[in-house]
Image: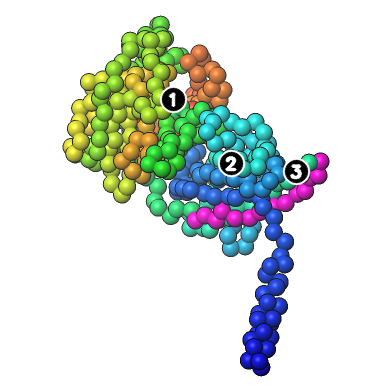
Amino acid sequence: MAIVKRWFCFFIIIAVGIEPCFSQEYRQSIDMRTSFVPGTVMINGKPIVYYELHLTNFSNDSISLEKMEVLEGVDSSVVVSFDKDDLMNRLSRLGLQLKDKENIIAPGNSRVVYLEWQSDKTDVRLMHRLSFVLSQGHKKQTFSVQGAGINLSEKPRIALGAPLRGGPWVAVYDPSWGRGHRRVIYTVDGKARIPGRFAIDFIKLDTLGRYANGDNNLVKNWYSYGEEVLAVSDGVISATRDDFRESSTLSNHPEYPAGKATGNYISLDIGDSCIAFYEHLKPGSIKVVPGQRVKKGDVIAVVGFTGQTTGPHLHFHLADQHSALGAEGIPFEFERFTVLGAYIDFGKFGKERWTTVRDDSPLIITAERPAPNSVIKFDVEDN
């Protein structure tokens, strides 16, 4: 009997000792995750990091996003801050390729926040602090949650040769576009990825800013059409596809599903898990085969009008695997190009000449990524 009493007292002591752990207040709120964090890329002389924050509301109440801060992991100092309006412009609802116009996440719903910001450090641990309002009927309470720690990649930036000759070429992309490559998620083999995170569409113009000579509906009239496509680095051709046909007019071009977005394409393995993708190539123009070694500057195909596209152009991106849609897009820069100007208002693209830089003086750039919708020229000698 004494033994039983001693054991009883022992259990009581344990229960009292751990009671404070169970008395802490717990509230369901929001889950924050990052699935892929690439390294920085230089744009206009500034190192920029791209990544996505995935948010899921696990509570029974609607959550209104008010503010997000990126914090230095060591001292919790604020590196960059996004207010409610900025968050709304970066927020997308899963399953849709359009910007979500409201900052509210309903119970059980998820959102993706697309982030791009200047980062002067690459060897740093970062955290995220999200401030939000929890709505319970007419009652509203303000909370914050901190998490989603990330380490920025220390991998050296990748500088590539030119994918095309001459110009003017418009580097068509903008991280804020709801239908842009940056915001299109593909789910392949059970995993969601963004292959076009850093993709650029190159469209050639004349000196007046027109992309076609005459009738824009005729594919052959586009200045991009038939332009030679170049290997951006020494490497090995990993895959080609050349079974897409091509219509002679834009109006007769079929609508392709996401699985056929690439059209005819080439993938080039340049080593260190870096695969260059060239898409929308002209039928019968591919000059290489899988397993073939190429040198930087070799002509490998010509620009065409195949796949999911609204006009002849070259889609180019770099990814971490040999899959056009089932890989993560990684940053890249070009060794050298000349900036002629930019389309500040992209609504004027194809209608007016671009805005020039430095009083019409071209700007020679080395080891950078072209800025969104900048007009550039590649200085490449014929092989």
Whole-Å distance between the Cαs marked 1 and 3?
46 Å
Whole-Å distance between the Cαs marked 2 and 3?
17 Å
Nearer-N-terminus badge (2/1):
2
Front of the two marks 1 and 3: 3
Q: Which contiguous range is marked in magenta?
A: 138-151
The crowding category of the residue bearing disc 1, from other C-alpha atoms within 10 Å (few below 14, some 14 to 19, many at least 20), is many
Where residue 77 appears, as percent x and y from the top left, is: 64, 57
Q: Which residue is drawn at 43% across and 55% down?
A: 154
Query: The C terminus lies in which quarter of the figure?
Result: top left
Under circle 2, the secondary element is strand
Q: What residue type is labelled 3?
A: Ser
Front of the two marks 2 and 1: 2
Q: What residue type is labelled 2?
A: Ser
Q: Is residue 183 above or below residue 283?
A: below
Where residue 241 appears, as percent x and y from the top left, is: 26, 28
Q: Which amino acid does label 1 sit on?
A: Val
Nearer-N-terminus badge (2/3):
2
Residue 170: assigned label = 1
Q: Confirm whether the magenta stretch covers residue 142.
A: yes
* Residue behind mark 3: 135
Under circle 1, the secondary element is strand
* Residue behind mark 2: 110
Whole-Å distance between the Cαs marked 2 and 1?
35 Å
